[in-house]
Image (cartoon, helix red, strand yellow):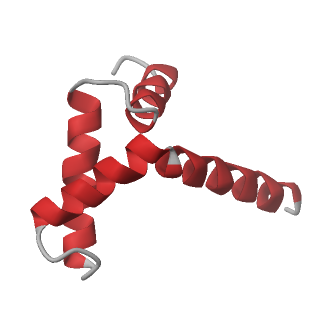
Amino acid sequence: MSSAEESRETMIGALENKPGAAREIVCLNAGAALYVANVADSIGDGIAKAREAITSGAARARLDQFVQCTQRLGGRA
């Protein structure tokens, strides 16, 4: 990535189910995290859960909620 904006666009694309390496890496990392957190029975199961969250739009919706929350908190400082 050559800029923060390029990185942001890549991550948004992954969460909007844009095919490519970024989406696959997000699914792999999320799948491993879900397994370690005992939310998934295996890394493969975690990857499947991550794919479903991306495909359904839930992952992007959660990011949007996080952004809104941090913006509200930032306004209180």
In the image, residue 35 above or below residue 71: below
Judge by depth and name the residue closer to the eye, 30 or 3. 30
User: Is residue 40 shown left or right of residue 72?
Assistant: left
For image coordinates 48% across by 50% down, the residue present is 59
Percent x, y for residue 15? 43, 38
Quadrant where the image shows the C terminus: bottom right
Percent position (x, y) of residue 14?
A: 38, 33
Camera-side residue of 25 and 16: 16
Q: In this view, does 49 lie to the left or right of 15?
A: left
Camera-side residue: 26 or 3?
Answer: 26
In the figure, is residue 3 to the left or right of 49? right
Q: Can you name the residue that lies furthest to the bottom here?
A: 38
| Quadrant assignment, res 1 | top left
Q: Which residue is drawn at 52% across and 22% down?
A: 5
Instruction: Tell me what residue is drawn at x 79 percent, y 62 percent.
Output: 73
The image position of residue 74, as x and y in percent, is: 79, 56
Which residue is depicted at the point 21% across and 38% down? 24
| Number of numbered labels in the structure image | 0
- The quarter of the picture where residue 36 lies is bottom left
Q: x and y percent of residue 16 in the render?
A: 46, 32
- Toward the right, the furthest residue is 76
